[in-house]
Image: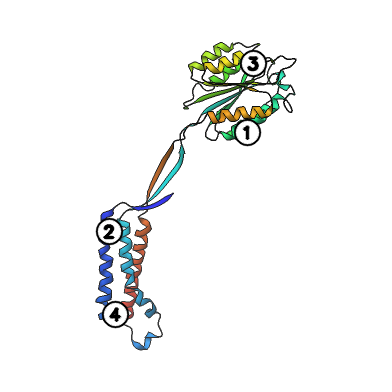
Amino acid sequence: MNDLIFENKWAWIFLLIPLFLIFWHYFYGKKSHSHLGYHLPKNQENKSLKLKVKPLLPLLPIVSAFLLVLAIAKPTKQSKNDKVYDNGIDIILAMDISRSMLEEDFTPNRLEASKVVAQEFIKKRINDRVGIVVFSGESFVLCPPTIDHGMAIDQVKSIENGIIQDGTAIGMGLASAVRSLQHSKSKSKVVILLTDGVNTTGTIDPYTAIDIAKKFQVKVYTIGIGTPKNNILGIDEPLMRKISSETQGKYYRAQNKQSLNQVYEEINKLETYEIEKTSLIKRKDVFYWFAFPAFLLLLFYIILEYYYAKSLT
């Protein structure tokens, strides 16, 4: 939003000058044969363009004086921006990419379904930095926290089973995600950890990872994905609940793509805060908008005065 304001309010007193000039011209100037004290011979009046310009001459110093008063009033162009936001939430999606994620109880499989839902989630986090961690037998930071959501989504699309050794290192996946946030200055730091298994390997056990998350004040939402196979649910739900409860997060079960969508939607609603708007105001002096035209009009007036005076000699 742009506004033009005049900072020197006292300058308005000088408006009396152009008002005085108008008064002088209409009540005294017309009593003379000409505002200059001379006129063209009658036989030249219809042949010259001078008469067409001549009536405008008294207006030039009046308009010039008015513009000079506006310039003295210190006009300032004020630009106000209400769309400067403070930092959003930093979120890491820690995704299990072990071989079991290729199970087809989701369409087309658990891994591909979780990738699609993760991409939709990232699109909704407009003011947040989002990062990606993948884990199976070990963990890997695929994308550090970034506001470039297009890049984060491209990294999610590139995820495949087999890019790191197989296994389920939940502790390492969580630890890598937390460490990606350890230098974050965001108001809220969140990890969404998705897995379909139990911790079977890794150099960092899940309980140590929990302590690391608590140390850096990272909230962890855990998602167990998959349906029971032969009446056996392959997810370590007690561990998932402990991770989330110890870090002020929440545990969810997702048995199909629809319920997984609902899980991410709920997390999306939970992880919000009141966005603080900052009004950024820029000021720019624009006195020259009025001073330059005033100068040009005054110069034009002087030139015409000289031209008329010379034409009589």
In whole angstroms, how far apart are the C-alphas of marks 3 and 2? Answer: 75 Å
The amino acid pointed to by label 4 is Ser
Disc 3 target residue:
138
Disc 2 target residue:
12
**The C terminus is located in which quarter?**
bottom left
Mark 1 and mark 4 residues within 8 Å of each other at the beta carbon: no
In whole angstroms, how far apart are the C-alphas of marks 3 and 4? Answer: 98 Å
For this view, does 122 lie left or right of residue 80?
right
Image coords of residue 145 (percent x, y): 55, 27
Label 2, residues with CA under 10 Å away: few <14, some 14-19, many ≥20: some
The amino acid pointed to by label 1 is Glu
The amino acid pointed to by label 2 is Trp
Disc 1 target residue:
120
Label 1, residues with CA under 10 Å away: few <14, some 14-19, many ≥20: some
Mark 1 and mark 3 residues within 8 Å of each other at the beta carbon: no
Camera-nearest residue between 238 and 107: 238
In whole angstroms, how far apart are the C-alphas of marks 1 and 3? Answer: 26 Å
Number of the label disc, if any, that sits on residue 161: none
Disc 4 target residue:
34
In whole angstroms, how far apart are the C-alphas of marks 1 and 4? Answer: 80 Å
Image coords of residue 173 (percent x, y): 60, 18
Q: What element carries label 4?
A: loop
Query: Looking at the image, is mark 1 or mark 3 earlier in the sequence?
Result: 1
